Amino acid sequence: MHRLVRRTLLSFLLSAAGVGALAPEAAWAQGQPLDRWLVTSLEHAAGDHPLPMAGPDRFPDRNLETDAGAWTLFRRDGEAALDFSEFAEAGQATLAHVYLKSAADASVRLELGSEPCVRLEAWLNAQYIADPGSAHEVRLAAGWNTLLVVLDGEPACERSLSARLSPDTGPNVRPERDDRSGDGLTVQASRPPGVGPTWPEGVVTVSAPRVTGLVWHPDEDDLQATLSYDLASWGRAFGSGAEGADALGIQRPEAPFRNPFDLPRRSGATSDEADDAEGDEEETGPTDPDGLRARMVAQLLGRPEARVPAPRGGSVELRLAGESLVAASNELEPGVPITFEGVIPFRKLREAALRNDGMKAEFRWDRGDGDGEGRMPAAPVLRALHGALQLALAAGTDGVWRGRLRVPDALAGFTLRGAEGSWTVDGAAVEDGVLCSPCERGRRLDVEFRGTPGTDGEGPRARIADRGFQDLPETGAPPAVELLRALEGDNQRYRALIGGG
């Protein structure tokens, strides 16, 4: 059994509209592991795309001998965590490649994980994914997409990779209804007939907001949630002419792949049957060694349709339960997210996570516009509630932080403990930094703090001392949405559900 790897998350967020069409709803909600890859090893310079930008070697195939080495099928049905250490050689990086077929420009969330000692790089449709480990907004194109992952590190470092696809809830533009057959997301290791360079239609997307913290301001009746969210452009790279695109390592436009004749592979099986048989070790030859079948299919399909390029400028008005957040830029680059920040009341954040249409967005970009809607994930809201809470007290010249705080609904019934230091509440010193226990909704607290504030200099911190969402076991716990819905009134039902009294 492959041991679980510690995950460095790399999230690829796409427009929410395509998600539902990728797989049956129940199964898709649980995520789909990328359990089959073509793997090889070669010397690699960090940041450089390791595959050629033209010719048959650009699209790997099993057992195909190329300058990058021989691509070998690695398949573990249903498993997301895979160990490629057998392909690791001294001084060489491990390359893993997979094909993803989507029925339309689609929304997915892709989580990549590896051992901490591994340097992870990734390219989707030959476009580099910058800063692995942080959240990114990306988009699958209709038809066959390519995902290339490079793992590098010391020889003793286990070359483990964990990869899983799941739906995203971002409020992005919905594509026109696509009536082509094949609703499922196809994950395939071997090179599909007719595969070619592709990218999605030019569009602007926004990520589901990330909750970066909660702030408690004096004399306010609600907490304020600080959020960050990414605006990104997707599509063909800027520039004119196919030669310029190839020089940049970016792919030319390609129509969504259709194979009306379901041309057989060398084995005689159809494309679907052949992929089901990928685990057969007796298959020794590449499926299309010289790219002849790919060129024949391309000729049958005709000239690729033009795609609108990635917008240079775009904007979005993101509304969470009626609260408006805006992002705009005239310096967008394909696949490179720009991060924005905003603040909304905690009760509005909760409402956005409880409503199916809690997030709505209005987009404008070069040559296009659109609207979308989604739902704010509930789990990050609960994690933020039980995380560090910034107290926006005023710093005096005597080094004492002061302010009058009103207990908001979200903190009612909990025990609240301040960070290390000397605290007084209503003029009396408190033990162990306990500011209130249980905190009574609407009560006003005259708070003073003496000590060292947070490292950012923005004031002291406090947190709920009771058991929280993050303390619940992964299995058998109530869904995050159910817990968040119980967070109301004096929060008694919520505290009972999490076992906090």
Image: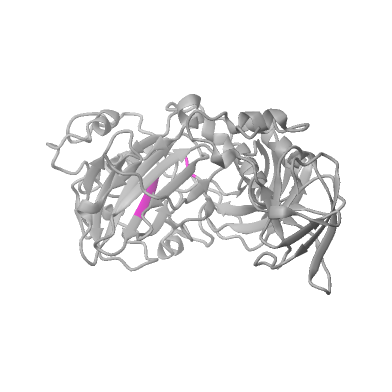
Region in magenta: 140-149
Along the viewing direction, whichever of 225 and 310 lies nearer the viewer: 225
Along the viewing direction, whichever of 168 and 369 lies nearer the viewer: 168
Q: Position of residue 202 (x, y in %)?
A: 57, 49
Above or below: residue 480 compared with residue 160: above
Quarter placement of the C terminus: top right
Q: Quadrant of residue 259?
A: top left
Above or below: residue 495 compared with residue 327: above
Q: Position of residue 72 (x, y in %)?
A: 21, 47
Q: Quadrant of residue 118?
A: bottom left
**Magenta stretch: residue 349 in it?**
no
Q: Residue at x 78, y 31 (%)?
A: 489
Q: Position of residue 106 (x, y in %)?
A: 51, 39
From where the camera sits, is residue 470 visible? Answer: yes
**Magenta stretch: residue 146 in it?**
yes
Q: Main secondary structure of the magenta part?
A: strand
